[in-house]
Amino acid sequence: MKAASPLASRTLLIAGLVLILSALVDYFVLLVPPDFSNRAQQVNLASQFVDRGIVPLVGITFLMLGGWIQTEVEGGRQGVILNAARLASMGLAGLLSLLFLLIVPLHFNNVRVQKSTALEGINEQATRAQGELSQAVDNQLQQERSRIQTLLQNEELLQEAIASGQLEGEQVNLLQKFQSKPDSVEAYLQEEAQKETERLSTEISTRKEQATDEANRGAWKASSRTVLSSLLLAIAYALLSWTGLKSS
């Protein structure tokens, strides 16, 4: 066991330094090039920072554990370089604790603003579609009116449409009714236009509701996951820094 102690301490120290340095390099790459004016990039950056937050935490823990084994188990003394690295890691833990603590309100606000922008876009799109609804129904109404009038004014064309199967069942009955009662055409068209307007209006409202629910659900997931994880990391780094500085 004693022979294994130096190997254990060196392994933990090396692993800890590698993890810390690799995490710092990773964070540096994420921040280059910086674009803090882009809110979507801020949200994505905060999520990636939090996702990688466990790596330096493990590295600092390894470094502390390796130093403890070296001094307490082996009975040796920490060198100047190792002691400086240990103190630097404690300072890094404090800075990361502050960073993750700051991410909590910043990320929450960014997601909130991003959700508000998305909801505004959904409302504008629904309002635009609702405004274009009348014109779309009027165009369909005019096309149907023209088709019916063409068939009623041309008996030969009407019979050809029936014989070819283009008109059948209820459509044939309606046209026969229109032939005997031409005044009923406009009432029929207005009734159909009302039905189509209600159908399309319901469809627009349904799409708007679905898009709104999806935006709210996505914002809640993005906010809660990153905010809670960041808060836990802030607490963990603060405790790690306080423990390391207290024992030094």
Image (spheres, rainbow, N blue to C red):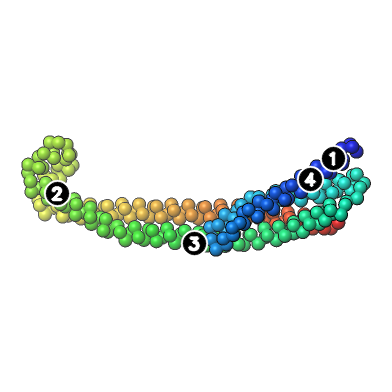
Q: Amino acid at mark 3?
A: Ser
Asked if the residue at tag 1 contacts the one at tag 2, i.e. Cβ–Cβ closer than 8 Å, the answer is no
Q: Amino acid at mark 1?
A: Leu
Disc 3 to disc 1, how far (Cα)? Answer: 56 Å
| Front in this rendered view, residue 100 or 108 | 100
Q: Amino acid at mark 4?
A: Ile
Q: Is residue 156 above or below residue 84?
A: above
- Residue, disc 1: 7
- Residue, disc 2: 148
Disc 3 element: helix
Disc 4 to disc 2, how far (Cα)? Answer: 86 Å
Disc 1 to disc 4, how far (Cα)? Answer: 10 Å
Q: From the viewer's perspective, is 52 left or right of 242?
A: left
Q: From the viewer's perspective, is 100 left or right of 211?
A: right
Query: Disc 4 or disc 2, which is closer to the eye?
Result: 4
Disc 2 to disc 1, how far (Cα)? Answer: 93 Å
- Residue, disc 3: 116
Disc 2 to disc 3, how far (Cα)? Answer: 48 Å
Q: Position of residue 141 (x, y in %)?
A: 21, 54
Q: Name the N-terminal-most of marks 1 and 4.
A: 1
Q: Amino acid at mark 2?
A: Ile
Disc 4 to disc 3, how far (Cα)? Answer: 47 Å
- Residue, disc 4: 14
Q: Name the N-terminal-most of marks 2 and 3.
A: 3
